Amino acid sequence: MDNMLASIKSGLDGVADAIGQDDSEWTTHTLSRGPVEKGGAVYIEIGGKTT
């Protein structure tokens, strides 16, 4: 878990670029580890603002 966010940095940059939003505006990140998948996998869930 220690390096999970750093490891996905380029992927998050790609998501930010694809949706046209500066990732510096993102205020919440939730990381979790799921079951091991052969070949590896990363799943990203994007949600809207909550108040």
Image: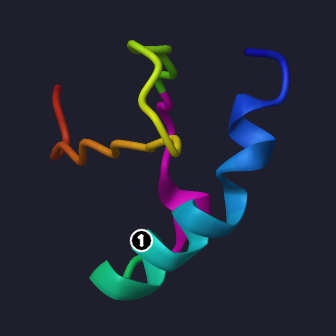
Q: Residue at x 34, y 42 (%)?
A: 43
Side (left or right) of 1 relative to 12 = right
Task: From this view, report whether residue 5 is shown above or below residue 30.
Answer: below
Residue 30, position in %: x, y? 46, 22
- Is 50 within the magenta? no
SS label for mark 1: helix
| Magenta-drawn segment | 22-29
Specify the quadrant that holds the C terminus. top left
Q: Residue at x 47, y 15 (%)?
A: 32
Residue situated in front as seen by the camera: 6 or 40: 40
Task: From this view, report whether residue 3 is shown above or below residue 26.
Answer: above
Q: Residue at x 71, y 31 (%)?
A: 4
- The amino acid marked with disc number 1 is Val
Side (left or right) of 2 relative to 37 = right
- Is 26 within the magenta? yes
Residue situated in front as seen by the camera: 4 or 37: 37
Residue 13 placement: quadrant? bottom right
Residue situated in front as seen by the camera: 23 or 36: 36
Residue situated in front as seen by the camera: 38 or 27: 38
Specify the quadrant that holds the N terminus. top right
Residue 22, position in %: x, y? 52, 75
**Main SS type for the magenta part?**
loop
Q: Which residue is mark 1?
A: 15
Side (left or right) of 23 relative to 46 = right
Side (left or right) of 47 relative to 36 = left
Residue 20, position in %: x, y? 35, 86
Residue 21, position in %: x, y? 40, 77
